[in-house]
Amino acid sequence: MPLTAPMDEELRLALPDLTRAERQLASHILTHYPVAALGSITALARAGGVSSPTVVRLVQKLGYKGYSDFQRALRAQVEAMLVSPLVKQAHSGAAPEGHVLTRFAGAVAENLQATLAQIDPTEFDAAAALLADPTRRIFAMGGRITHAIADYFVTLMKVIRPEVLLMSDMSNAWPPALLDMKPGDVLLVFDIRRYENAVLQVAEVARERGAEIVLITDRWVSPAAAHARHVLPCHIEAPSAWDSNATLLVLVETLLAAVQGLTWEVTEPRMKRLEDLYTRTRLFRRYR
Amino acid sequence: MPLTAPMDEELRLALPDLTRAERQLASHILTHYPVAALGSITALARAGGVSSPTVVRLVQKLGYKGYSDFQRALRAQVEAMLVSPLVKQAHSGAAPEGHVLTRFAGAVAENLQATLAQIDPTEFDAAAALLADPTRRIFAMGGRITHAIADYFVTLMKVIRPEVLLMSDMSNAWPPALLDMKPGDVLLVFDIRRYENAVLQVAEVARERGAEIVLITDRWVSPAAAHARHVLPCHIEAPSAWDSNATLLVLVETLLAAVQGLTWEVTEPRMKRLEDLYTRTRLFRRYR
DNA sequence: ATTCTCCTGTTACAATCGTTTCAGAATCCG
DNA sequence: CGGATTCTGAAACGATTGTAACAGGAGAAT
């Protein structure tokens, strides 16, 4: 019987119980949801790179009598989607109350909120403006663990604007980078609890060389704050042996969004060109 | 050839030139637009109270070669109708009002909740168990952007257990790593939208070499799912030009917490020793 | 009223559909 | 490694589809 539960959810939930070919098909349907399954079973099978019996088996696993039944249900859902484009998420939670998943996500949500309540929007905007200034070059560095966050920042920032550099995690690469810094350049520093000496020292030297420092740290604030122009403290508590850096990542992404907003007229054509290059090198998947 | 002009408009425009039965049918299609015409010609004819040849004649008057042709065009249009509100929803967010900070954090919180509601705890636990198994070696790889997340995972996982390897972002380092893989090894793959061919291929080869693959992807599910043993889909929508990887990071941290929980008796002394080493090398700050 | 013209639905038919069967392939497990 | 089990696509099937041909029927003009 046709269920009215969102079918994409249903598919994703069933994913673990599927076989290779079925999963490949489900993945195809999800990436082209829902139009992929609006045509004939043959067309869907070919598009998904499987045989039509596989399609039937998949939809039967989902609880439908056959492809026709499945399609009827899908159409009803498409209708609902078209009538109210608002996708309601009133889906009952799947994770048990005490599961790690629940506890962790809860902690992160709390951190987010607490961080938000405590960050000064003026500071944030000023930092974003610094990072958006095309006359300044951007450097980023992190500690042992936050290095990955710095890496993430640089990867995306390089899409937005030129002159962005990640200070490697190998400390013998730092002196040359520091030497290269000019007054007015910006150094984005990540430093959280178990603050690292090396990070502090780099910040100090950078400041001496005239760089503006933006510091993303935890709520106990790294000593590197002494050299920083703008400080953005985050809540990082987590139910585990380590802290959670999710809040840092969110802050970074928000900074990126803000910078992108400030430099859109420059960034947009830049992204277009980049996308073109990626397409040409066939790095991304091509659909036949 | 399928036109992309709005079909309901087209129908209304043609209305005056139609005959009685045709008009009755057109009216039915319009009042039940567009779902009415998504099924078979027979169903549509019956629902409209006319015969199937009438349907054919109507769509031919509209300029289509036949019912199939007409339906193909309609599907394309439904897709357009469906995609734009979804995209718009993702980009307009809940509150167009407010600071970027608020909007972004809100979006991330929603993603977290949605992800949580949809991830199968069994899958998660199984994945964690795989990663905790000391007899297996762990490999991790990500795409252009998710590479940083993979890096983060590896950095922390190396603290928990030995035999953890990050597959570099330089693709010429992959073949040796793949060659090194043994049956039973685990490959943690990150692949989100704009799925990358390279990632897919590595996953495929790894599977052939007998590795177990854990895939962390977005809710449209990377095609690499076909080769994966466990799939963990995340919500990643954000009010910006890119997606947010915060949910991925949270999932990774939760996985780490789970693994750490499973291997605590091994991990604890390991962490102690590591801490000792870091102290001795004076990498961390010393308070006077 | 008759004829003519244009609609309209019934019928017939090939094409395609969705489904079932089954044998080989892949995978798991001891 | 080999046997058992599961998965998968080729083939075959009836059912249904979309279309073409055809004949009856409604209405207009004469």
Image (cartoon, coloured by chain):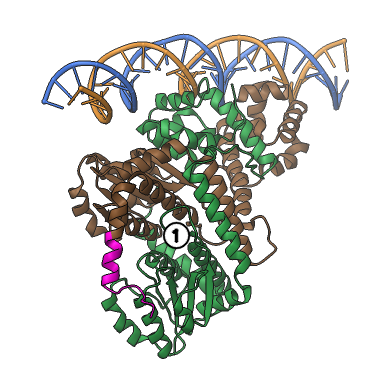
Chain colours: A green, B brown, C orange, D blue
Q: Secondary structure at mark 1?
A: loop
- Above or below residue A13? Residue A258 is below
Q: Position of residue B26 (x, y in %)?
A: 72, 32
Hey, which quadrant is residue B226 in on the image? top left
Please check the rendered image and state whether residue B235 is part of the magenta-colored stretch, yes or no.
no
Say which residue label 1 marks: A243
In-image side of A176 versus A153 (left or right) = left
| Residue A189 pos. (x, y %) | 43, 75
Is residue A47 visible from the viewing direction of this image? no
The residue sitting at 56% across, 55% down in the picture is A109
The C terminus of chain B is located in which quarter?
bottom left
Which quadrant of the structure image shows residue C28? top left
Question: Mark 1, residues whose alpha carbon is within 10 Å: few (<14), some, or many (≥20)?
Answer: some
Foreground residue among B108 and A48: B108
Q: How many marks?
A: 1
Chain under numbered label 1:
A
Is residue A134 depicted above or below B200 in this figure? below
Q: Which residues are magenta?
A: B273-288
- Please give the name of the residue rendered at 38% of the width and 61% of the height, measured from the top-left corner: B148
Instruction: Say which residue appears at 41% left-offset and 24% top-offset.
Output: A53
Would residue A83 be seen by someone viewing this image from the given angle?
yes
User: Which is nearer the eye, D17 or A217?
Assistant: A217
